Image: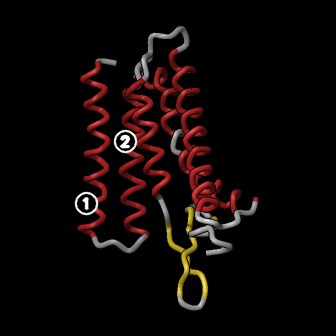
Amino acid sequence: VVEGVPGEHHHDHDQHAVAEPARGGIRKRTDYAGAVYGSMLAASVIAASSLTEPHPRLSLILLLVITGIVFWIAHVYALVAGEREAGHQVTWSQVREVGRHEWPLVEASALPALAVLVSPWLGAGENAWLALGVAVAQQVAWATLGARRAGASSGQILAEGVVNLLLGLVIVAAKVAVGH
């Protein structure tokens, strides 16, 4: 912890790592929570969207990206404001680090947005089912990868995958029930 901000954040090549205090210094742990949360957010946006607008694919792509960015800003603000309320001084460097750590919220919208873009060329037409499937699949993938990298047992990894699949299926069921 540096200057009162829990979990100073660092980047590794293909993962987001969070620094944690450890005996004699800082050790890194992998944190995929933002990617899982961002994927669930993307699935929710897709499920709640209606494709009746004049440019439905563009509208959904913009909605995915804008929602990811707004939630990213909200998470960064909440973490920084929480530190200030706890009496810790927060530097711009720390705000940038928190922003980098929370960036997977935005990144998680990229593949579903790409699926929306290419869906007509893949025979999926103007519907959002491909994008919803991609969002749920990446949610499960990030959760299981995060558990695996954190050293979870095979049973725990399986449980992470199943729980996230069930959460994703709840979103799919809501889309079916609403009839979008």
Badge 1 element: helix
Q: Are marks 2 and 1 in contact (CB under 8 Å)?
A: no
Residue type at numbered disc 2: Val
Residue in the picture at 42% in, 47% down: 138
Mark 1 crowdedness (10 Å alpha carbons): few <14, some 14-19, many ≥20: some
Residue type at numbered disc 1: Ala
Q: Position of residue 125 (x, y in %)?
A: 42, 17
Residue in the picture at 49% in, 27% down: 116
Any mark on residue 136, and which? Answer: 2
Toward which corner of the image does residue 63 lie, by quadrant?
A: top right
Residue in the picture at 36% in, 59% down: 144
Task: Point out the residue furthest to the bottom here.
Answer: 24
Badge 2 element: helix
Residue in the picture at 53% in, 47% down: 105
In the shown orientation, is residue 133 left or right of residue 13? left
Toward which corner of the image does residue 48 lie, by quadrant?
A: top left
Quadrant (top left/top right/bottom left/bottom right) for the N terminus: bottom right
**Label total for image:** 2
Task: Point out the residue furthest to the right here.
Answer: 92
Q: CA distance from mark 2 to mark 1?
A: 16 Å
Q: Nearer the viewer, residue 162 or 38?
A: 38
